[in-house]
Image (spheres, helix red, strand yellow):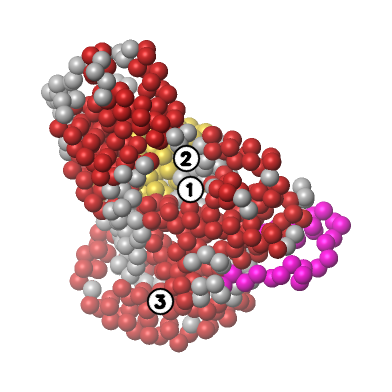
Amino acid sequence: MNQACQEQGQIMVAYIKQELNPLESARLESHLLNCARCAALEQQLSRSFRVANKWAPQVDDAHLDRLVSRLHPYYESSSRSSSRSSSRRRGPMIGMALAMAAMLAIVAVRYSQDSAPVVEPVIAEIQHVNPTQYVRMVTSGNWAGSVQKPSPEKVLIEMTRGFAVVDFTGGHGRTLEIRGPGAVIEVVGTRFYVEIPPEGQSTIVGVAHGKVRVRGTKDTDLLEAGASREYPLEGSARASNAGTAGAYFTDEFLTEPVVVAPAPVATPVAAPRAEPPPSLRKLFARAEALARRGKSREALAIYRGIAESSNEAEAPFRAIARYEMARLLGFSLRQPKAAERIFTELVSAGDPEVAVEARFARCELDLGVDPCASAACLQSLVSAGPAAVTSEAVSYTHLTLPTNREV
Amino acid sequence: MALIELLFRPPSPEEVVRTHGPAVMRQLRRMFGPHADVDDVFQAVFVEVLRSLPRFRAESKLKTWIHRITLNVAYQEMRMNYRSRGTFAPLDDVSEPSTDVDLEADLLDKQSLEILYAGLGQLNEKKRIAVILHDIEGMTLREISERLGRPLPTVASQVKAGRAELAMWMTARHRSSSDIRALGSTP
């Protein structure tokens, strides 16, 4: 097997799963046209994964009975320790039982007109989230996701687990988008809930009042008050009668009126950077293209030329060139110390825009080595930089912090 | 108070096994392959579930909690029996190819599944479980990271390395047998 086959083989599964960028895909496809062995491997892998993804092993009742009976010796000991444990916790359980009874009463009233609501007791701790003054959420304790604010009017929530009842006050160009497995929910102004079942293979959306547009993998629906549908990752949407969130529709946090805070004092904005001269623009474009093709050293030489240029017209762009140099050194040429030195210089240099980017990139340097240090570094940016960088830092922080330890 | 008692009556151990057993069995078969005997792993999962059930704090759904225990037990099993699982029936054992197109397609599907799990059986347990959860179970890297309690970059590199080793193993296997070529010529 030659070097090219080995390199292409390493990314073959990523190609089958359609995760490669267009350039990598084109390169691999061109290789497949000229290499019968790799083409056969691609067909084999593709078929194997397609069959495995569809494979649903059946469990027959007789076999399950046998397995259940094999576990008989363990049932009694489990029941004994269970009763001991429950008697120890009787006090808190009574309080919880009363709380649950109250919750059930609310759900029963809420769903009394529906034919067969499924009321599932949710004992998880409730969290109140207030990403903006216009978006308020009551989420389950096991909720996981990230909240981003690309602009003051737009809120983007990505959910991976749990459920959330969301109250959104629309108008004035405000938009809210929620993404879950198999569904993108666009909201205009309403109260609704989103639930991701534990398998994470679908998103359930139910509407309390107002309307919600949901884009599933196959269908796009406009859900009205009272409607509830489940959107799987694969296949069509189906009706759902999940009622776990019913009680939370009436949570005080959601029903209290929105208090509009006074407009924030505008922070001073740096003077806009002048347009680069055409020759410089070409140099940047060339360096970027080289870097994208993996020719990092050539790209580095171009950026270094710009950074060390004595031409006054290019002065406002030297910091950008140095920043790009540091990124190449740190992330492509594996020279993190040199990169960190340049990022540190840029943080204290006069260009505020580049300084924020450099602080962010300095945290990223740790990402592959020490995710916890990287997370802590990003956390420090959350309360500092401009809004765009802050929201990105929040999402990175969420990604890198190890959250749910195994049982 | 009857409603409350009903709500808080914990399911009996047998009810737990009967309710969640089929899903656990399906999950284990998909993790260990079509030829693996997973009855012992199933028993190990529910022994752990029943042992820990009194301490279950309902911070997550019971189903999620059992799924997490299933992954942990399966991972321990893979670690103990590294390279001995993922048994692969040699192609000589397969009956003569049929002229019936559907039957032939079924046969090829079965072989493809067996080849895939044989390849997965060659990976170490960390890469193997990462590739299975990501590429067969369809979990995202972040979900795997949360379920296994591993940092996201670690999971990503395990998936990448596992995929590369799987492709290498299949290529090497192709050099010693002609079944890939035979499959490649089938529409």
Left or right of A256, for residue A404: right
Q: Which residue is mark 2?
A: A183
- Residue A167 figure quarter: top left
Circle 1: element type: strand
In which quadrant is the C terminus of chain A drawn? bottom left
Q: How many other residues sit within 10 Å of disc 1, few (<14), some (14-19) or many (≥20)? A: many
Q: Which residue is mark 3?
A: B48
Residue occupying the point 71% across, 70% down: B90
Q: CA distance from mark 3 to mark 1?
A: 28 Å
Q: Which residue is mark 1?
A: A202
The amino acid marked with disc number 3 is Glu
Residue occupying the point 21% across, 64% down: A95
Q: CA distance from mark 2 to mark 1?
A: 8 Å
Left or right of A350, for residue A189: right
Q: Are marks 3 and 1 in contact (CB under 8 Å)?
A: no
- Residue A303 figure quarter: top left
The amino acid marked with disc number 1 is Ser
Q: Are marks 2 and 1 in contact (CB under 8 Å)?
A: yes
